[in-house]
Amino acid sequence: MRNSIYKNQSKILYCPFLPGLMLITFLLASTLTSAQAKISLEKAIELAKSNNIDLKIADKEIERQTVLKKTAFQPDPLQVQYQGGQFNSVDFDHNVSVQQFFPLGNVTKANRQLQEELAKLAEKRKALSSYELEKAVTLAYYQYLYGISIQRLNSELNEIYTKFLKNAELRFKTGESGNIEVISAKAKVKEIETQKEQLMYDLAIYQKQLQFFVQTNENIIPDETTSLKYPFIENKDSKAESLMTDFYQQQISVYQKEAGTFKANRTPKLGLGYFAQTINTESLFQGVTAGLQIPLFGGVNSAKAKAAEISVLQSQLALDKNKIIMNLQKEELQNNFQKQQKNLDYYQNEGLQYANQIIETAQKSYANGDMSYWSYISFLNQAIDIKKQLAEATHNFNQSAIELQFPTIKNN
């Protein structure tokens, strides 16, 4: 029975960001008796968003792209030239000139618009990261609460079998039963006590997973008064679909502005200059110059503009594809959610009542000598299995509800 009762008790929330070595380090660095601060799910999400390093990196990327707006105006480097020698007569003369070329047309405007769109794209990426973090924290939070529910079931089983052991010992003393009942009861109580220790380690793992996502040194745990059932609220306006659409549309906007920038770079540049020189060693003769830089070979920028336009089409196709994937995913998640909801409703509304009635009736009958040892064990196992299925049903419901609330977003 040991393997069947708690076969899912040690499920670990998969986290691609948490290497095994780090997890082991966390566990070794903490003790089961250390002070722990209880925290609500809302507070955990709030702390995670303020502490998470990935989000801080995203903030810096937004800041970087904002700073780069100042690079929109991109004149060529100032050209300074000196000439000395016999270029006017046999005398050694001097010539100093400076020249500066400036972009014409909409080059500066195009660069500025592109940089503004890149800053907005960085904000969209941060929004996606924040969404994924909220999902991860929620899953970790309810994974811990699942561990708590298994721990409570373990305590209830311990109480049931402790009473069973007392009854078995009494029946053995009065000669109503054999020693096999006492031995069996003692073995079961010891087994449950061993499982209790294992559950403590499972909870420590769940706690460190939550702490990892919140990224705090504080030893936090979920508030145990929180309902074990996730409070799912169906929302017709899908946040995931909105975030995904915003990201791809912003990506499209970036490529459009990028194409505009390459096209603008095909326009000529205006150059203004000044010179001063000596003639026959007499000075100072001055003048100004003006000129144009004409990109006769503009194929490079034209090709880059065409490539950016192709990227626009690629992003639009990716958006269309992921909309289809998300709709199919939502249908699958919705079906699974309804399945888990019905399963949980049965165990909450009927199954649990049956289990309690079976335990209560079996205990009374066995204590009064109206039921055999083997019948008692059979009924007890049936009731325990129902309670185990309730814990599993609640856990599966929570997982399906959270997945439906936070469907996976594809952004590549």
Image (tube, helix red, strand yellow):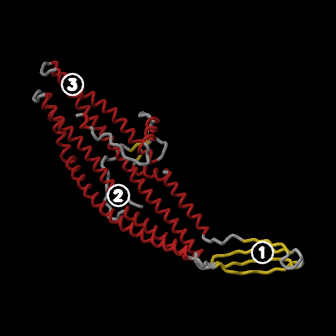
> Mark number for residue 407?
2
| Residue 69 percent across, percent down from the top left | 58, 67
Q: Amino acid at mark 3?
A: Lys
**Numbered disc in front, either 2 or 3:** 2
Q: Quadrant of residue 101?
A: bottom right
At x 26%, y 55%, the residue is 336
| Residue 41 percent across, percent down from the top left | 39, 49
Residue holding disc 1: 97
Name the residue nearer the viewer: 192 or 345.
192
**Numbered disc in front, either 1 or 3:** 1
Mark 2 vs 3, N-terminal side: 3
| Residue 379 percent across, percent down from the top left | 15, 35
Q: Quadrant of residue 362?
A: top left
Name the residue nearer the viewer: 61 or 145.
61
> Mark number for residue 363?
none
Residue 250 shown left or right of residue 327 in the figure: right
Q: Circles 2 and 1: CB distance less than 8 Å? A: no
Helix, strand or loop at mark 2: loop
Q: Quadrant of residue 335?
A: bottom left
Q: Circles 1 and 3: CB distance less than 8 Å? A: no
- Tell me the distance, in whole angstroms, between the alpha carbons under discs 2 and 3: 51 Å
Residue holding disc 3: 166
- Tell me the distance, in whole angstroms, between the alpha carbons under discs 1 and 3: 107 Å
Residue 259 shown left or right of residue 409 in the figure: right
Q: Amino acid at mark 2?
A: Pro
At x 61%, y 78%, the residue is 295
Quadrant in the picture for the C terminus:
bottom left
Q: Amino acid at mark 1?
A: Ser
Helix, strand or loop at mark 3: helix
Q: Residues within 10 Å of mark 1 (few under 14, many from 20)?
A: some
Name the residue nearer the viewer: 89 or 279.
89
